[in-house]
Image (tube, rainbow, N blue to C red):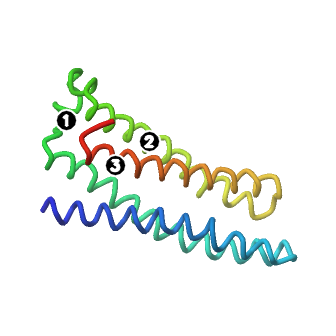
Amino acid sequence: MFKLSLYLHIISAMFWIGGMLFITLVIAPYLSTIEDRRQRSAIYQVVGKKFRSIAWIAIIIMLVTGPINLYYIGVTPSVLFDIDFARSSFGMAIWLKILVIILLLISSLAHDFWLGPKARNSPNFSKIAKIMGRSNLLLALIIALLAVFIRAGGL
């Protein structure tokens, strides 16, 4: 069960982060070559909605498999909330990852369900959504780095 959970977690993270990288490094530069703002916005809305639907499935999978994976490596809730564990290098890496995940979830919800729809008709909201999307990518990359630290034993 642990190997399946870990596999699903890694595949979901790859899809989610890979998708954000693809949008940032491929789709966005392509769209900047289109002069008509409405056409650019329409394409981005279609791509964004499709990715959002699949990305949230990946996020939900990671939110389920993350705690399962922690349990299988011996980090039960009682261990997680133990002050000595939290002060250890390993515990700090896990807690830092959890905090960044919470920040990213809040930011992603705001980006996908509040800013994104407003960006359709507003250049100002569009600019903010773009910055927030890239910030979310940065947070996701930090989470991936923290996962490496956790796998390597801590910070």
Residue at image position (28%, 66%) is 8
Could you tell me how far apart the alpha carbons at marks 3 and 2 are, in whole angstroms? 15 Å
**Which residue in the protein does label 3 denote?**
147
| Horizontal and vertical percent position of residue 53 | 49, 69
Residue toward you, 105 or 88:
88
- Residue 79, placed above or below residue 14: above
| Horizontal and vertical percent position of residue 91 | 27, 32
In the rendered structure, which amino acid carries the disc numbered 3? Ala
Label 2 crowding class (10 Å Cα cut-off): few <14, some 14-19, many 20+? Answer: few
In the rendered structure, which amino acid carries the disc numbered 2? Ile
**Which residue in the protein does label 2 denote?**
102
Dividing the picture into quadrants, the one containing residue 21 is bottom right
- Name the quadrant of the N terminus: bottom left
Q: Secondary structure at mark 2?
A: helix
- In the picture, measured across the screen, residue 100 lies left or right of residue 28, that is left
- Name the quadrant of the C terminus: top left
Question: If you read the primary sequence from the N terminus, does the residue marked by circle 1 or circle 3 appear first?
Answer: 1
- In the picture, measured across the screen, residue 71 lies left or right of residue 42, that is left
- In the picture, measured across the screen, residue 36 lies left or right of residue 149, that is right
In the rendered structure, which amino acid carries the disc numbered 1? Pro
Q: Secondary structure at mark 1?
A: helix
Residue at image position (28%, 51%) is 66
**Which residue in the protein does label 1 denote?**
77
Could you tell me how far apart the alpha carbons at marks 1 and 3 are, in whole angstroms? 18 Å
